[in-house]
Image (cartoon, rainbow, N blue to C red):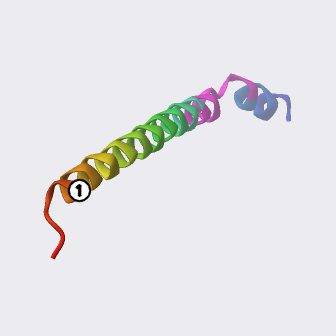
Amino acid sequence: MSGLLKRFQDDISGATAIEYALIAGLISVVIVASATSIGTRLQEIFAAVNDGFPET
């Protein structure tokens, strides 16, 4: 039984998986924030272009 507990204590694959999950979560937050910012800016650009055309 103590051998099993020792192997469980020495196993670091769970910690590595958690680290990768945290990195992936951080990357996804950055992507969402960037996409939101770009989307807002594009909306402003398209509105300006639309305002440049005459009304029909």
Density class for disc 1 (Cα within 10 Å; few <14, some 14-19, many ≥20) is: few
Front residue of this view, candidates 33 and 2: 33
- What's the amino acid at mark 1? Asp
Residue found at x 41% / y 40% = 37
Check residue 13 for magenta coloring.
yes
Report x, y in % for residue 19.
57, 29
Left or right for 34, reference 3: left
Relative side of 16 to 56, left or right: right
Q: Residue furthest front?
A: 55
Which residue is at the front of the view, 2 or 8? 8
In this image, 48 relative to 17: left or right?
Answer: left
Quadrant showing the N terminus: top right
For the stretch drawn in magenta, what is the main secondary structure? helix
Magenta span has 49?
no
Q: Quadrant of residue 38?
A: top left
| Residue, far right | 1
52 vs 18, left or right, is left
The residue sitting at the bottom extreme is: 56
Please give the count of numbered marks on the rendered protein. Answer: 1
The residue at the point 18 percent across, 70 percent down is 55
Query: Could you tell me residue 42's position as x and y percent?
Result: 29, 48
- Residue 36 vs 12, above or below: the answer is below
The C terminus lies in quadrant: bottom left
Residue depicted at x 33% and y 52%: 43
Residue 3, quarter of the rendered image: top right
* In the image, residue 53 above or below residue 43: below
List x then y, in percent, for residue 7.
Answer: 70, 29
Q: In the image, which residues are magenta?
A: 9-18
- Circle 1 sits in a helix, a strand or a loop, which is it? helix
| 33 lies above or below 48 | above
In the image shown, does 18 or 36 lie closer to the viewer? 36
Q: Which residue is mark 1?
A: 51
